[in-house]
Image (cartoon, rainbow, N blue to C red):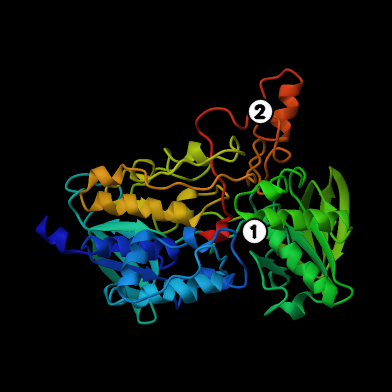
Amino acid sequence: MDMMAELPVAVIGAGPVGLAAAAHLVQRGIRPLILERGESVGAALLEWGHVRVFSPWEYNIDAAARTLLERSGWKAPDEQGLPTGGEIVSDYLAPLSALPAIAANLKLGVEVTAITRHGHNKVANEGRKNAPFVIRCRDADGEHRVLARAVIDASGTWSRPNPIGVDGLPVPGEGEASGRIAYGIPDVVGKAREDYAGKRILVIGGGHSAINVALALMELQDAVSGTEIFWALRHGSVDRLLGGGLNDQLPERGALGLAAKQAMADGRLNMLAPFAVNRIAPQGEGLTVDASLAGKPFNLAVDRIVVTTGFRPDLSFLGEIRIALDPVVEAPPALAPLIDPNFHSCGTVPAHGIVELAHPEPGFTIVGSKSYGRAPTFLMATGYEQVRSVVADIAGDHVAAHEVRLVLPETGVCSADRVTGSDDAGCCGGPAPADANACCVEDADAKAKGAAGCGCGAGTQTRRAVATSVDA
């Protein structure tokens, strides 16, 4: 056991949540070992570095990280400012990673390929709990194995975007057309401008990432004639997504919804819903999309496709350790009911920690956006609370591990469809009228007709959706 105490705690991923975990470990006198696949900290954030997040700086800086940084003379950005992904890296993560206690234990360009217990496969029981973790990883010099007393997986989901198919699978032709398909939030007015200017663009998805892309394309449309935008929702309508408006306590997100709504009213966005792609085929320099629109055959010729249908966790390197995941959401079983988009639309996600994140493998936890599995919404502040609790548990401070120290802003915009659980999600027709005792429009309408309500505000297992997954 003395040997175990001398080993570091491995943190997989050097994004905001991974570096926050490292900061909490340093603050408690525990050596972290941070393994980042990218060539810099915040590598995933840099891929959407041009995007401004919805949550202000006050929710994007971890408390332990702030303490360490301020001791070094760092000055925090304006608390109410809204940073881009690139600014989060340059103004926060880069200075944090440069602190000696973190920099000395940070390994970049290292891909974790497997985790196991020393001398134990997944089935072996005897002595398992006291055996150190073995992390197999690969860098420019080849494969290596390192030992750790505990593992915090903060590797995120950015590397595994969901495909186009409504059934969760790539549609025929999707792979072959990959050169003309972008996943996530491409910089359509910056680095990727030439790929989109004056082109016919199909945007697929109904979350705030899709709104971001559509509005950026509209900016391009103002500058370059001939730019056409088709926005396809795979399920339902956009009304629920745009419902929060000015009632959203994250003002930037409320403004985003209102801007998209006005664009639709002005006819600048060609809306397609519900829309399901069946096949993609090359056509000259562009693509032909064979689809169904409202259940009827529909064909569309486009130059590019942008897919903003969410992400899913990479579980490929966890095959030899014991993890428990909800079969639907792919989140830890105790967390899944709090975030399952099949049931939750409005409301809050209660702050949570080691209790909800625990797996059958002692000493192993998944945190950050990856802990949410396929549930679409995550806030960095939630991840910071997760790692505070997890690190307290690793340090043996079980009282602190079980405390709740996070208060999040309520929001009028939710990002899950309470019926279908799709990425084309929103909040039950928008906020309820001011004089109604209801959580949303549909709830108010149902109560006006004598019913109990729409159901999205019922029960204790509700969630707070305060940022898109890119905030993670």
Q: Quadrant of the N terminus?
A: bottom left
Judged left or right of residue 149, residue 320 is right
Give the x, y percent position of residue 440. 68, 35
Q: Element type at marker 1?
A: helix
- Seen at 64% across and 34% down, the residue is 439
Give the x, y percent position of residue 333. 43, 39
Q: Element type at marker 2?
A: loop
Q: Whole-Å distance between the Cαs marked 1 and 2?
A: 26 Å
Question: Which mark is drawn over residue 280?
Answer: none
**Residue lying furthest top:** 450
| Residue 179 versus residue 396 in the image, above or below | below
Q: For label 1, count other residues whose C-alpha is less than 10 Å away and answer few (under 14), some (14-19) or many (20+).
A: some
User: Can residue 199 be seen in the rendering of this structure?
Assistant: no
Kind of residue sitting beneath label 1: Glu
**Based on the displayed image, in which of its 4 quarters is residue 107 positioned?**
bottom left
Judged left or right of residue 209, residue 56 is left
Q: Nearer the viewer, residue 215 or 59?
A: 59
Give the x, y percent position of residue 203. 75, 61
The residue tagged 1 is 252
The residue tagged 2 is 437
- Seen at 63% across and 55% down, the residue is 251
Q: Nearer the viewer, residue 134 or 426?
A: 426
**Based on the displayed image, in which of its 4 quarters is residue 171 positioned?**
bottom right
| Residue 467 versus residue 113 in the image, above or below | above
**Residue lying furthest left:** 2
| Residue 403 versus residue 77 in the image, above or below | above
- Seen at 36% across and 69% down, the residue is 35
